Amino acid sequence: MDSIIVKGNGPLKGQIPIAGAKNACLTLMPATLLSEEPLTLTNAPRLSDIKTMTELLQSLGAEVSSLQDGKVIAMSSHNLDNHIADYDIVRKMRASNLVLGPMLARLGHAVVSLPGGCAIGARPMDLHIYGLEKLGAQIELKDGYLHAKAPGGLKGAEMELGFASVGATENILMASTLAKGTTVIKNAAREPEIVDLANCLRAMGAQIEGDGTPTIVVQGVDRLGSATHPVVTDRIELGTYMLAPVIAGGEVELLGGKIDLLGAFCEKLDAADVSISETDKGLLVSRRGDRVKAVDVVTEPFPGFPTDLQAQMMALMCTAEGTSVLEEKIFENRFMHAPELGRMGANIEVSGGTATVHGVERLKGAPVMATDLRASVSLILAGLAAEGETVVNRVYHLDRGYERLEDKLGGVGALIERVQGV
Ligand code: UD1
């Protein structure tokens, strides 16, 4: 397995291009299942999760080609000849469950393996099931698979999600575009990826209003057509690389970055004494003083502080002036990076869903283990300013969510290299 070696090397300077959003792309790709006509995505990120979704869609009979070195994904679901999303693919990536709503809407039936838990928590699908049942689906769990059918087709309905789940909102939104009549989704997720999905579905002919607010209203249509859609900028990749010059010093311009994608993240950075300014190409970021100030963080649905940036923020807080309290409210087990940061000299106490970080002046490089996608990158960020060498093992998680990470950080002056494993 590959490892990444990072050496603390002082200030970073230059530009980092930000890719299209992994999480948007993983919900835009299954949207192809809703239409017999082609769907083309541009600005796609080149990541292993995208390959997994490609494999899954192909297993269902969709044609999926990767063009222009992976930046364009051309799909056609003219002939869907399988309605079973197999455990072997779904277990690799939870977002595979996003084929359920579209398949059900288009074919009237779907069998999708339950993804199971993952390192960061149990992650059930009850809200997806609740919403699809409201639309008239009958769903049964047999042998670890959800067997869903809608013999008379889906019918629009009003529903309220008990929690603003991103995946449930996406599955229900996609399904409702082809349901008869009006669907109202209350307490819908408001993440930019939801707005991106709605924009793509509208380009395919769907009638959707209210995306980006807690109430989404969909008027079902008989069929969806063809579209070409650019994937929105990856706000999590953006936020991650914004922290690089803040941790290591220097000034970096994040190409394609926009403040409105980041919600509370920018407010917290401002309070921590980080300078963020908009340029005509993106965002320019640097820390104002020698050390950032400790700030408290609570993870929440958008526009609150994103759980997917909590580990990276913890890496920053390790060397902040003062004590910071980070509360994880979205996933129950998302502090696995804390003991690894501790190996680098961080002073962190974890109690349930709360981590208290007492800032130290400097971290020291150490061999550490990547436990999940965002935890892995937090260790690399921490290594950028640590004394000596940090070796991050098991980096396959990183390749799921960060394209060419070594090139992007190396391009702004970081000393970082990948060592091929056996
Ligand atoms: C998406 C993102 C993930 C991000 C998360 C929260 C993708 C591919 N992944 O994941 O990177 O961390 O949003 O911003 O877009 N829940 C239930 N029942 C359900 C569904 C969810 O209890 O039916 C719970 C989950 O266990 C979790 C919380 O709700 O505790 C948030 O999950 P959700 O918003 O659905 O996240 P995902 O769509 O899985």
Image (spheres, rainbow, N blue to C red):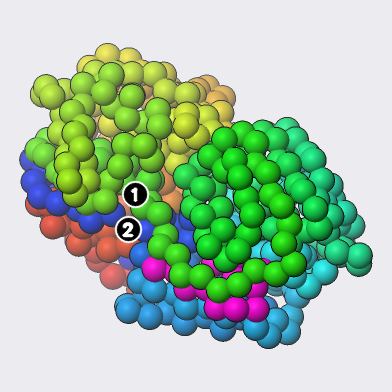
Q: What residue type is labelled 2?
A: Ala
Q: How crowded is mark 1: few (under 14 residues within 10 Å), some or many (20 or more)?
A: many
Q: Is mark 2 on a helix, strand or loop?
A: loop
Residues shaded magenta: 26-42
Above or below residue 92? Residue 312 is: above
Above or below residue 289? Residue 390 is: below
- Regarding residue 18, the answer to whether it shows in the image is yes
Dot 2 or dot 1, earlier in sequence:
2
Quarter of image, res 399:
bottom left
Residue at the spot 21% in from the left edge and 21% down from the top edge: 273
Question: Are dots 2 and 1 in contact, CB under 8 Å?
Answer: yes
- Does residue 39 show up magenta in the picture? yes
Q: Mark 1 points at which residue?
A: 237
Query: Does residue 304 appear left or right of residue 17 in this picture?
Result: right
Q: Along the line of sight, which residue is nearer the eye, 97 or 334?
A: 97
Q: Which amino acid does label 1 sit on?
A: Glu
Q: In which quarter of the image is the N terminus?
A: bottom left
Q: Position of residue 371 (x, y in %)?
A: 45, 49
Q: Position of residue 272 (x, y in %)?
A: 26, 21
Q: What element carries label 1?
A: helix
- Does residue 100 show up magenta in the picture? no
- Beta carbon at label 1 within 8 Å of ligand 1: no
Residue 19 marker: 2
Tell which residue pokes out farthest to the top in this image.
322
Give the Cα separation between the discs numbered 2 and 1.
Answer: 8 Å
Q: Position of residue 370 (x, y in %)?
A: 40, 50
Q: Residues within 10 Å of mark 2 (few under 14, many from 20)?
A: many
Residue at the spot 63% in from the left edge and 59% down from the top edge: 206
Query: Does residue 296 appear left or right of residue 124 in this picture?
Result: left
Residue at the spot 11% in from the left edge and 39% down from the top edge: 251
Q: Position of residue 292 (x, y in %)?
A: 21, 23
